[in-house]
Image (cartoon, rainbow, N blue to C red):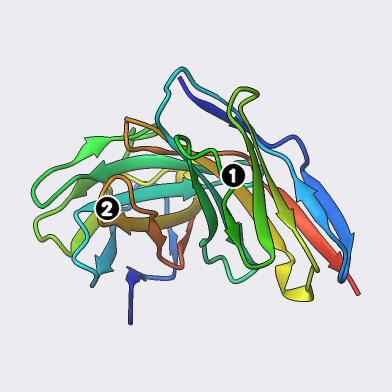
Amino acid sequence: NAGVTQTPKFRVLKTGQSMTLLCAQDMNHEYMYWYRQDPGMGLRLIHYSVGEGTTAKGEVPDGYNVSRLKKQNFLLGLESAAPSQTSVYFCASSRTVYQPQHFGDGTRLSIL
Amino acid sequence: AQTVTQSQPEMSVQEAETVTLSCTYDTSESDYYLFWYKQPPSRQMILVIRQEAYKQQNATENRFSVNFQKAAKSFSLKISDSQLGDAAMYFCAYRGATNKLIFGTGTLLAVQP
């Protein structure tokens, strides 16, 4: 079982570059989430989706955009990367709001 | 707004001993869920245990159990018979009506052989 798969696992960007992180889940989950994890802090929610075609802002949405064109995929975009966006990014999914979230292995993103 | 506080940045336990990790939270909601996640050096986020607020009975999963004190807004994790593989960062998390998981800052657990 693949579960939640994040692509890529590691990336280095220059300030101002753009990129997209891909999250794919094969569990037919309705809910999907993007978090960032910074040293000394817990995970913080960036954006989330409650179903195909829907997205909503989380705790720290500025500088990021997301899309959920297909139920199994949740994309996180950085239009103009900034050093403050250097972080580890986690994607998660859950069947319903009451079910536990399943996490991917994370993407380490460094912006120089 | 809901908050989750883990006041122990680091803890240490001897192999085979018992350790308790603390977590407190603040909320005005009556219906919510609480979770403990484990994050080993591999960076995976692994669900350890969860508790529904409406259940008075404390959740248990093998060597892991919680002490849920709803009135005190406390949700501690007890690890019995600690093993080397238990060494990890442990995060307490809250989820209420907003569907958003709110994490604490984590407790780094070291297990001494």
Circle 1 chain = B
Q: Residues within 10 Å of mark 1 (few under 14, many from 20)?
A: many
As drawn, is A27 to the left or to the right of A38?
Answer: left
Residue A111 makes an appearance in the image: no
Residue B85, position in %: x, y? Answer: 72, 74
Residue B59, position in %: x, y? Answer: 57, 51
Establish whether labels 2 and 1 are both on one chain.
no
Whole-angstrom CA distance, mark 2 to mark 1, is: 20 Å
Under tag 2, what secondary structure?
Answer: strand
Residues at discs 2 and 1 in contact (Cβ within 8 Å): no
Q: Amino acid at mark 1?
A: Cys
What residue is rendered at 36% in x and 41% in y? A46
Quarter of the image for the N terminus of chain B: give it.
top left
Decide: is B95 above or below B72.
below
What residue is rendered at 12% in x and 43% in y? A54
Residue B61, position in %: x, y? Answer: 59, 63
Q: Amino acid at mark 2?
A: Met
As drawn, is A74 to the left or to the right of A4?
Answer: left
Identify the disc placed on residue A56.
none
What residue is rendered at 32% in x and 37% in y? B99
Near-viewer residue (A98 or B56): B56
Q: Which residue is mark 1?
A: B92
Decide: is B1 above or below B9.
above
Q: Which residue is mark 2?
A: A32
Circle 2 chain = A
Decide: is B61 above or below A77.
below
Q: Nearer the viewer, mark 2 or mark 1?
A: 1
Residue B93, position in %: x, y? Answer: 53, 42
Quarter of the image for the C terminus of chain B: give it.
bottom right
Near-viewer residue (B1 or A54): B1
Under tag 1, what secondary structure?
Answer: strand
Near-viewer residue (A88 or A78): A88
